[in-house]
Amino acid sequence: MKLIIAVVQDQDSNRLLKALTDHNFRVTKLATTGGFLKSGNTTFMLGVDDIRVDKALNLIKENGSKRDQLIAPVSPMGGNADSYVPYPVEVEVGGATVFVLPIEQFHQF
C-alpha cells in the first residue's frame, strides 16, 4: 500500500476530486497555501493499493494541468528598487507535485 500526497492548484482541485472519486479512490482534501506565488493550493491524500498507484498518478497528471498566468509583481519594501519590474509577469502555474510513500499499516475506524 502507498500514500499518495498530491499538491495541485485550487483551479484544478474540483476536477481532480471528481476524477478520483469517479474511479473509486478515497480521498482526503486539505486546503493549503503555496510559498512561491502565495496562492491557494489543494493537497490530496490517498491511501492506494500498489496495483492502483499508476491509475491514480495518471488521473492526477490528466487533471493537474500546467498553464501560463500573468501575475502582478509585489513592489519592493525597503529593498533595492533597481530590479523591480512594475508590469505583470507571465509565469507557469499549475501542474501537480506528487509524493508516493510506502505505508506499513492502514486502518479505518
Image: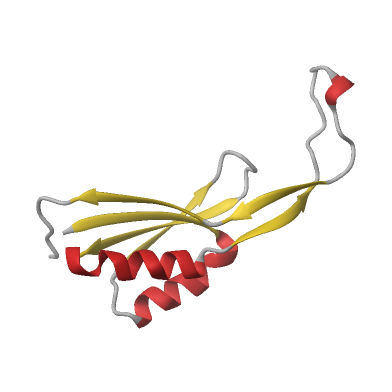
Relative to residue 66, is residue 73 depicted above or below?
Answer: above
- Is residue 26 among the parts visible in the rendering? yes
Residue 95 horizontal/vertical position (percent): 54, 57
Q: Quadrant of the C terminus?
A: bottom left
Relative to residue 34, is residue 64 depicted above or below?
Answer: below
Q: How is the image coloured?
A: secondary structure
- Is residue 49 among the parts visible in the rendering? no
Residue 47 located left or right of residue 60 = left
Say which residue appears at 36% left-offset and 64% top-offset: 57
Toward the viewer: 47 or 30? 47
Residue 29 horizontal/vertical position (percent): 40, 62
Relative to residue 105, is residue 49 depicted above or below?
Answer: below
Say which residue appears at 79% left-offset and 23% top-offset: 77
Say which residue appears at 16% left-offset and 59% top-offset: 1
Residue 38 horizontal/vertical position (percent): 62, 43
Toward the viewer: 101 or 41? 101
Residue 82 located left or right of residue 99 = right
